[in-house]
Amino acid sequence: MEKHLIELFNLIAIIAIVCFPFLKIKGRGILTLVVITVQVIIGSLIAFSVFSNGLIDYSYSGSFITGLIPIRVDYLSAWFILVISFTFLTGAWYGLQYMKKYIDQTSNVTMHAVAFILVYTALIDICIIQNGIVFLVIWEIMAISSFIIIIFEHNKPETLKAGINFLIQSHICIVFLTIAFMWIKVKTGSFDFQSITAYTSANPAIVGFGLFICFFFGFAIKAGFVPFHTWLPLAHPAAPAHISGIMSGVIIKIGIYGILRVLLLIKTDMITIGYFVLFISVITGVYGVMLAIVQHNLKKLLAYHSIENIGIIGIGIGLGCLGVGYNNQILMVSGFGGALLHVLNHSLFKSLLFYSAGNIYQAVHTMKIEAMGGLLKRMPRSAYLFLIGSLAICGLPPFNGFVSEFFIFNGLFNGILTNHFLFILFILFTILGLVVIGGLALICFTKAFGIVFLGTPREPLGDDLIAERPLKMVPLYIIALAIVFIGIFPVLFSPVLLKTIQLYQPVINLQSNIQIASLLESITTIGLYSLGFIALTVILFFVRHLIVSKRNTCTDVTWGCGYTGDASKMQYTASSFIRSYRKLAEPILQIKKGKVNSTGIFPQQMNQVTHPYDKVESWFIDKPLFYLKRLLNRFVFLQNGNIQYYILYGFIFISLTIIVPIIIEKISILINFLNHL
Amino acid sequence: MVSFLLILFASLFFMGFVLRTKSIASGRKGPGILQPMKDIIRLWKKGSVFSKTTSFIFQIAPTAYFTSVIMAILMIPHGSHPGLISFEMDFVMFAYILAFGKFFMIISALDTGSSFEGMGASREALFSMLVEPAFFILMGSFALFTGHTSFHSIFTTLHYGSQISYMLGALATFVFIMIAMIENSRMPVDDPKTHLELTMIHEVMVLDNSGFDFGVIMYTTNLKFAMYGAIISNFFIGVLPLEYSIPLFFIIQLGFAIAVGAIESFMARFRMGHNPQFIFILTSVALLIFFGVLLVLGKFV
């Protein structure tokens, strides 16, 4: 039954793409939505059947290249299938409305729709296939179709540049994965994922760790761990809003899936891996949010926040590994549970934020935070939805972000009670990191929400009234509901999470652990507490409303210390709001500043610009590229534009491939001959 | 329940004692103990003026701020009597729920589109971010020291054994008083009495609030002071029976109020640029406490 569902899932995508040429542009849009919806239903059916009936495990015979192709859907796959499907459903719905503006670019939109279906199908297939080479092929399909959906506005040069950056980095990721899979293939002769387990358990821990590093680097590029994150802040602003939401919500999460999957397969010293992942994740989280604050492009700000949230997820994974290594169940459940739940939570609030940002973009045609202001009055629905997203991403109760951070904090404070000094030091470092992340996120989102939606416009903005059509807002409402729902009833997710985490510790039954029971009790209390908080706020606000409406109230201009003219130019701006933070963080960040001061008796126009740049990018990408270019420039004479030369190069290459082996063979014969003398 | 009522009761008088201390220190007789509360009630009876620029955010923010503090107070225990809501890791919830209120106050300041209030908002956001690590490390040290992870279980099992642990207790009290001062934007980080917008933090955020809402904000400050006083009192109450612990609670609140008054009378406000350094010191003191606890427990290798 499930086998047919999986086949049907892929078949629908193929049939839909074949049908595309025979439809009008509107029909293509609707077909995309219908196909994605049907696929989401099938995907969810598969996931639910896994959670209720247990694992799906069967294989196709494959060809002589691939060997047996096993299809295994376990709880981890099912969890990711559900997360990916939900975001793609809302993304397709919102995207259909978003794309109506571009309906005259027929071929461009069609290509976009095709790639969109392909990305979704590939992502789900990645979650279920356990054969190295087929995995790589599907990964490649996913990477290329992601590239196509990112460069939708490819007439803009910066979009194309960001897209190509993404494409190159995706392939560096594939190189790492290929090396890892080849390593296994050479050593065991099989592409089956289970041979990884067999190989690493038969070899010393260092081999397993090396293999893990290979996989980790590959998946970390996709997920956006520092220092592999540099494609992310470029690609997100370039893509259309629904793609940014999907990319940040789920495409980068496939990297997290990869890491979690590999952790399940590799049998090695989990403690070293745990410290390694924890260290990188804390750096990722803090660095991501530190840079997010200084960004003045709304989508870029959100993109850096994805890096921060990947850091939080990574902290959870690191803790979970340490829990497995030290055989500490509560640490394991808190860590992996927090990570898995944060994958879901982040996909919800980040897609909500990106979709609202898309509404803003279509209304005012810019993403410059400095130009905006007072948008709450113009687009109230997007504003309040953005507010919910902001509160959730800051990890504030009563929303879902808090629940997953609570899981991780629970792990951290329970970790303090252990007896390993090094471990306690790491925990201390992580607590510091996580708290700083939370505080900085608060600065960042008070800035983003406050400057964009409140006050008055700082520059004259375009006015496009179609931005807030009710149909376009429906997916956003659904996401907001889910955010509040998880915030209030987090405990409903615990059976699913426990089942998934049980994969990492098949021996001991997690349900019977006392500490875990107390964690679940806390989670239940948190939900009720959040509900109480909402109720109390509503009641008190109602009381306040009754009281204030009895008193005489009036409206007037904002207090301006005697100045009564137009103060919109004198408002606090995004850069002035974060100035004191920037001063503190300046040694760590790289901020280019330009300043023209006023001089003389009759001052001319003066200005000041700050332009944040990514220090890691300049170290790891720009500098090496610069030296590489300098080296390669020496060989520029080879590329002289004459077709004759290129044919010659080809000829030389072919001759060498034929002659070199022959020569080597002759030499070995000669050596053999000499040995016999 | 006990602690909730006690904190509500203490909040009525707290600011009065602070003001009286300050008056005596400056050689004046000073207003009555209930005067600050009377001022707040007077504000509650007044009408309000709202800025044309503001939106619904500005209306709901004071209520959200007040509710967040009330919800935080619900978690504070009183010696062996747990708070109304008590669960494992409730201090994480405590910090985050207070942050929720702060979030709303900050965006309500930005809602006015003022050229001053953003300044206060920006400083409040930065300073409360900087102070958060100190709180978490301190709670981490307590968790490490007692082996428990909720307000109630930590405070009921807190015993001072050796001399070094008394020193740690004193340091923790110092850090908590300073956290309370920063969270309430008082000296030495901020001076609520200067009426120069450039040097204020909290006061400049609420320039446009008036009438009932302003009264709510003022009262919330009192509540917050009493709340931190209650946490500090818990360091010392332990498992004493109620007839001893309630007087001790009020003595500690009184001591805390006098300390606040004394700090405000005899210290100058720091230069705004030096505040982050001062707040970092709190984090390092908290780290010192943490390592001290490791030393006491013999986990230091």
Image: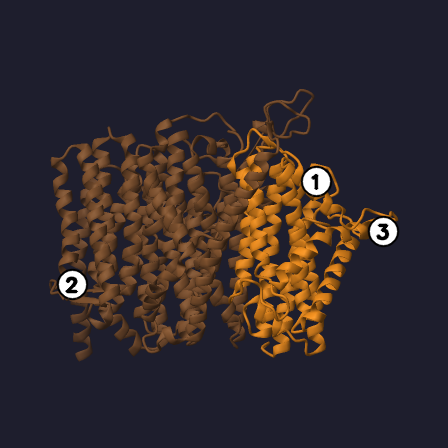
Chain colours: A brown, B orange
State the residue position of label 1: B42
At label 2, which amino acid type do we have? Thr
Q: Residues within 10 Å of mark 3 (few under 14, many from 20)?
A: some
Q: CA distance from mark 2 to mark 1?
A: 81 Å
Query: Residue B24's mark?
Result: 3
Q: Write down the chain letter for disc 1.
A: B
Say which of marks 1 and 3 sits in front. Answer: 1
Classify residue A62 as left or right of residue B13: left
Share a chain, discs 1 and 3? yes
Q: Which mark is residue A66?
A: 2
The answer to whether the residue labelled 2 contacts the one labelled 1, judged by CB atoms less than 8 Å apart, is no
Residue B8 in the image, given as x and y percentages of width and height: 65, 55
The residues tagged by marks 1 and 3 sit, at their Cα atoms, a distance apart of: 25 Å
Residue beneath the point at 59% across and 30% down? B51
- Calculate the distance from the C-alpha at mark 2 to the C-alpha at mark 3: 87 Å
Q: Nearer the viewer, residue A400 or B133?
A: A400
The residue mark sitting in front, 2 or 3, is: 3
Front-most of A6 and A261? A6
